[in-house]
Structure formats: C-alpha cells, structure tokens
Image (spheres, grey):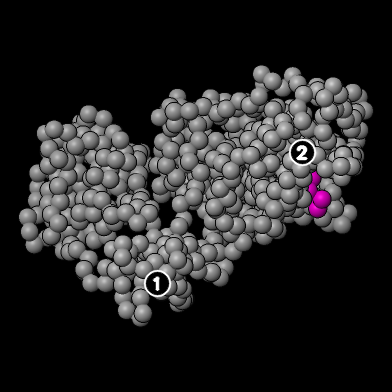
Amino acid sequence: MMSLASALPAQTSEAAEHILKAAQWNRLYPQEKVYLHLDNTAYFLGETIWMKAYVTRSDTENRSNISRVLYVELISPRGFVVERRKLQVTDGLAWGDIKLTKRILKAGYYEIRAYTRYMTNWGKRNFFSRVFPVFDKPRTEGDYSRMSLEPYDVTRQPDERRASVSESENVDRDIRITELPDSICFEADKGCGWALLHGSNIIAGNTIKEGEHARLSLARQKMKEGVWQMVLFDEAGKEITHRDIVIAPKADSELKITVRTAGIRPCGRISLDIQGPPHTAFSFSAIDAATVCNGFQEDIREWMLRKSENWHRYDWNTMAGITPWDGSQVIEDRLYLFGKVIPKEKSMPLDSVTVSATFRGTTERMFGSVKTDSTGAYAIILPDIEGIWNMQLSPQVKGKEAEYRITVDRHFAPPLRPLEDSEVRQIPVDTARIHRWQIAPQDEQEWQNMYEKNATVMKEVNVKGKRKLDHYDYNAFTNTEDAEHFSEIYFDCEEAAEDIADRGEEIPELTAWLVQTAGRYREDSYGQGPSYSKDPGEEAAKIKHFPTWNGRHVVWYVDNQPVGGIWYPCPVLLDEYQSVYISDSHGHNEGNVTVYAYSYEHDTSKWSKPPKTNRQTRYTHYYGYSPPSEFKTEDYSDIPPMPDFRRTLFWAPNLWTDADGKAHIEFWNNSSCTDMIFSAEGITQDGHFITGQ
C-alpha cells in the first residue's frame, strides 16, 4: 500500500502542506468511538439492561487508552434522561447494567446512548445511540404476549432531521471510483490536491497539476475493512468534494459458536464452545427466542465500520485548519471535579480563592482543598471511587468564608437528537439466527410436567394493575413507591436543581420550573397555580385554583397531603423537593390530572426552611463509577427444576479466548425455552471487530 511519504511530491507544495497539517492534527487529536453490546433487543418494565462497552481510538484503530470514564444514558420516549451510568473504562472495555424500575414509568421507545466527555468535542452525533422498545410489565409472571406499543410520540423529536450521509452528492462526480475484482481505483481531475483516508489516518495524497488527473489503485487484500474516503481540496486546503467506499469485514474474523448440548431439558445445562482469534475480548448473551419480539439492529462491525464512520466524523476542513475547532472538553483519564466560583460582586477577585471540598461516602470520608486560577476555575483530582458521595464545597479567601457561588462543570451531554422513523418500529426477527432443539422422546414427560407447573404459576401470580382513586383517598400515596406505580411522568427535582446551581443561577420556585420544563403544565388566567408561603410563620401556602395540564384541571398533593383549597405549609423552592410524579389517568376526580410532589420533609406540619447560616457552602453530590452488577441465575445442579421465566438466559460481559482462540461457556436453561438466539461480539488484539451467532 502506498505510504503518505511516498505519495507526496519531492518538493514542498501547497497540497503537501495541507496534507501534512491534516496528518499532524489527527496525531494530536485522535478521536474515540464507542459501541454497546446489549443482552437483548427489547425489554419489559422490571427487567435489567445488561451492556458491554467497547471504546476505540481512530489513529491506532484499536482499543482506546485515552478516556477512562464512559457515560451511558437512558432517555425516555418524552426525551428525559431517566437513568445515567458512569462506567470505568479499562483498556477500552467497560460493562454495567440499568434496572428498568423506579423512574422508568411508562412503556415506549427508549434510547440508550454512550459517550466519553472527550468525544463531545466533535459534535452532537458522534456518540453511540440505539433505540429499542420497552413494554409494560407482564400482567402475569412469564406472560410476554403483550408486545405492542402505541404509535411513536413525535414530541420526542426536535425540529430537525438527520442530514444525509453524503454532504456533497451534487459534486462527488468529480471523483471516480472503479471497483475491480482484485483492486479499487480512485481517480480525480479537479482541485489542487487529493488525500485518501481510512478512518482519520491519511494513507496517501498528492497534488493535481493542471491538465493532469490523479489516479491511485489499491489491492483489495491490502485494504483494511471499514470506510475509505477520497477528498479533493483547493489551493486554500478547503474541501471541494469527497467520495466514500466501504470494505466489508473479512469472513475469517467471525466468532464460531458450537452447541455441545444434544438434548434440551427444562432448567437443564447448556454447553457451548467458542472458536475465534487468540486472546480476543468478547461479550456473550443467550436469549429465549420465544420471547423475542424485536430483531437485532446493527452489530459491532456494522456500527464501528459503517454507521459511526459518517461524513461528519472526520471533517477535512477541521483537520486542515480551515474550520475552527473548539476542543474545550477535556480528556477524563481519571475522575475529576471541575467548576468555577462566581463572586457576589464584580470587584471581588477570581484567582486564589480556596475551594474546600468534603466527600462523605457510606463508610469513608475525604477532604481536600484547591485554589482557583485567574478565571475562577478549579479542578480536583479524585481517586477511583464508586457510588454516590455527599459533597460539600466551601469558598474561602485568606482563611475566611467569602461570598462566592460555587458551580460544578458537569453538563456536557450531547443534545437530544432526532430519531428516524426506522428506529421507532419493531424489527422482524431473523429466524436464521435461532438455534432450535428437538425434544427427545425420553424428555417429553419432563417437559409436559414443567409446562403444567409454569401454567399454574402464570395463573396464580398476578401483577397489580393501576386503579382509580377516590377523591378523598388521601392515604393512597403513602410513599414515593406508590406514586411510581400509579403515575406516568416523573421529574427528578434534585437533579434539576443541581443543574441550575451548577450553572450558577438562582433556584426557582417549583411551579415556575414546572411551567418552563413540562410545557403542558400551565398557570392560567384564573390563578397563579401553586402559591407557597416563603416562611412557615407567615401566610401558609396553598395551591390556587385552575392550574391546568393540557387544559385539564390539576389536583396537587404535597407529601401525600392535598393542598388544593386546603391550607398546608409547604416548601417553596425547587431544591426543597426530591421528586414530582404526574398521574395523567388516575386522578382523584374523573378527568383531572394529579401532581404528587415529595419534599425532603414528608411531615408538612413540621416543615421549616433550611437555616440561613453558611449560605456560601454548596451541598451536592458527586457520582463516582457505577459498580456493575453480577448476572445471576439459579444453579440447577443443586435444586430441582422450577418455574423460571428469564428472557435473557445468560449474560457474560468479560470473556476471552485463549492462546488457541478457544473459549467454553455453560449456563442453565429456563423452564420453557427450546429455541435460543446467541449473540457474541468483541474486538481482537489488532483491533478487528468480530461477531458470532
């Protein structure tokens, strides 16, 4: 294959300078890509999403050693982040899980996305994203027949659509690509110079003299799999056009799965052999094919080599220095805490302000302090901690408390992206992926007995449905768990208040924030909606009449107490509340919408405002790494078979082939499965993506 050095002319030219500048930029700022292997293709409320992350870098085309922190977010059909995980990346690998409970209140199409902070420097679409259906919890245990969803709610989509794959279709005829059986030829006539890229690496490049044309022929066997791009640029280095071509993965890079279990039994042992490249990291899932209602989307190769290699990922104008690049988001090679101090008065200094930090975990405490720079910014390096820590930040100048507001820089998540129509529909299941067993005659009676046991359990165990509440049924919502069960919409007030404080803004009243955030909640001309006392000793607060939700009357409950037309002292500000739940269909009056708000003091008669002392101290939380859970099943070598309705039969996120490329897997079947779908995905030592079925 032609090298960059051999492709350049002997003497310096404008084209050579642009090519070298782009190559140097790519060496200084290699990009990262991420892919999530999920255990299943669709889920029911109450289940767990198991995931394995693969993070690679563009220059070496192998596992990344740049970032060590990966963010994974689950986004509801209405566009809210309902769960977030912070995974520790080691040698480009990480794994974790998300339980579909608590804030996951409603069935619909959910999006899961993953990114590193460093990745956000390259725009809002350079992250992993997948959309899948989440169905209501089965009415009876093991009954997965309700696999349908309402039409997609278009309010989830911003007012934009995804751009086309090729930005320059009207001019890409200036580049000709000829595909021959053993080679591929690139030709161009227009422009000052050309460059050939694989990923972000410039493979070749040269000038185009007037009256001549550029021609480059490459042998297919020597071309790496993935997207190749030829770029034409003018004298200033600006791109004129480009053309892409995809080299499909080689067939010998597969993980081969061999089933060793001849006959299948209820809750019986399943034995598999894996054959692939030596010392390959991979993840594996086995699912009950009878419970699969949504086909597989792209695998690791399809995502890493095609979907993530879109036209906007490697922008030639940015690499050549034509388009400015911000690059303000740092590389998180460990856990950090970044932020700024905001003085009460402009005359107050920004530099050398001491920020004292206290972290309190379940059993540990950490203390430290750091001084701000000339812009008021501070940075604290943290050890590899897990879970949620209470964090206290205090500003001081010359050893005395000072009137500064402390912000935390942790809001760099990509904006909500538009979803395509193809993402919000169920995909037919590819029957070729299903491994089917024939029940042996000697096992038929055992299966019949288990079918009868399963049917008995499914008949007797009922999941409680939502029910209408009487108007004066004040004790129906005794805690937040009840609200989670009866409501369709959830707001995390604590997280919202933290976001506002992190930006250095004043905390609003709860209802003012709800009007701005929810959109459908309004305070109409008949009243101002919930109006709270700002001091329990003054006029007590109450909800005024005619707050509305989509034009329907709203009934308010605060800490399980009705406040509409009845006087109860209530907290005022958003940061004095933990959560808000909205029941759109289970209000206390027919046709009403009910709002349930929970403060930090559930006894409203004893509520009091926080003390006004030490107002400069910031009380918040720090989120360390999210520790992964362990996928567990019953060990049926010690107990007899019993009704077992697992849809994901087995999940192993961190498997490796040995020096001979072999691996062995064993797990237990559920009590009804006779057809399975296997999914194995991984990356080899030299950076090839592999899959197995």
Q: From where the camera sits, is residue 683 visible?
A: no
Q: Which residues are magenta?
A: 685-690
Frontmost residue, 620 versus 547: 620
Residue lying at 41% horizontally and 49% vertically, measured from the top left:
102
Residue lying at 69% horizontally and 35% vertically, measured from the top left:
236
Q: Image height check: is 547 above or below 604? A: above
Q: Position of residue 466 (x, y in %)?
A: 33, 38
Frontmost residue, 467 versus 543: 543
Q: Position of residue 345 (x, y in %)?
A: 28, 63
Give left or right: position of 370 versus 344: right
Q: Main secondary structure of the magenta part?
A: loop
Q: From where the camera sits, is residue 540 visible?
A: yes
Residue 235, image quadrant: top right
Name the secondary structure under disc 2.
Answer: helix
Camera-side mark, 1 or 2: 2
Counting residues from the start of the chain, the first of labels 1 and 2 encountered is 2
The residue that label 2 is drawn on is: 14
* Quarter of the rendering occupied by the C terminus: top right
The residue that label 1 is drawn on is: 353
Magenta residue check for 688: yes
Counting the numbered discs, the total is: 2
Give left or right: position of 161 versus 396: right
